Image: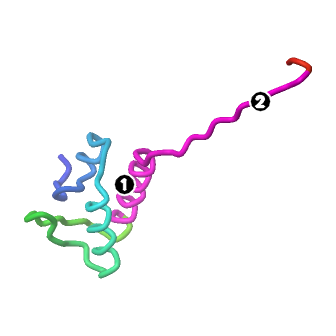
Amino acid sequence: MEQSNGLFSRERIEMTTTFTQAQLTALEAAIASGTTEFNYQGRVVKYRSLSEMQEVRAMMKTALEGTESKRTSRVYMTSRRGL
């Protein structure tokens, strides 16, 4: 059985399809401070290593990029001779 790492455990990541920018910001702040344990919304979050934190950060960024609204454009073609 995998040990729970709080809010961002691998088990939860595989089950969760959405993350918040606040979660990503908290994780990035912890990475920047060099700690593998921090508090987030009243919970203690623990990671085994910096590399695990970086892996989770990459997953979160990928998930968040998919939720951003993407700008679409339309192209209207006209022709005098037909298509």
Say whether disc 2 or disc 1 marks the residue closer to the N-terminus.
Answer: 1
Magenta includes 79? yes
Q: Is residue 70 above or below residue 23?
A: above
Name the residue rendered at 23%, 46% in the picture: 12
> Residue 31 got which mark?
none
Q: Are marks 2 and 1 in contact (CB under 8 Å)?
A: no
Q: Position of residue 49 (x, y in %)?
A: 31, 69
Q: Nearer the viewer, residue 9 or 49?
A: 9
Q: Position of residue 48 (x, y in %)?
A: 26, 66
Magenta includes 39? no
The type of residue carrying mark 2 is Met
Q: Nearer the viewer, residue 50 or 23?
A: 23
Q: Which residue is mark 1?
A: 60
Mark 2–mark 1 distance (CA, rounded to whole Å) = 39 Å
Taking the image as shown, residue 53 lies to the left or right of residue 38, namely: right
> Residue 77 got which mark?
2
Q: Nearer the viewer, residue 73 or 19?
A: 73
Circle nearer the viewer, 2 or 1: 2
Secondary structure category for the residue under label 1: helix
Start-end of magenta stretch: 52-80
- Write down the quadrant of residue 8 in the picture: bottom left
Name the residue rendered at 34%, 79% in the picture: 32
Badge 1 density bin: few <14, some 14–19, many ≥20, Cα 10 Å: many
Q: Which residue lies most toward the left here?
A: 42
Quarter of the picture holding the C terminus:
top right
Taking the image as shown, residue 5 lies to the left or right of residue 30, namely: left
Taking the image as shown, residue 42 lies to the left or right of residue 76, namely: left
Secondary structure category for the residue under label 2: loop
Name the residue rendered at 33%, 65% in the picture: 53
Q: Nearer the viewer, residue 72 or 78?
A: 78
Q: Is residue 73 above or below residue 10?
A: above
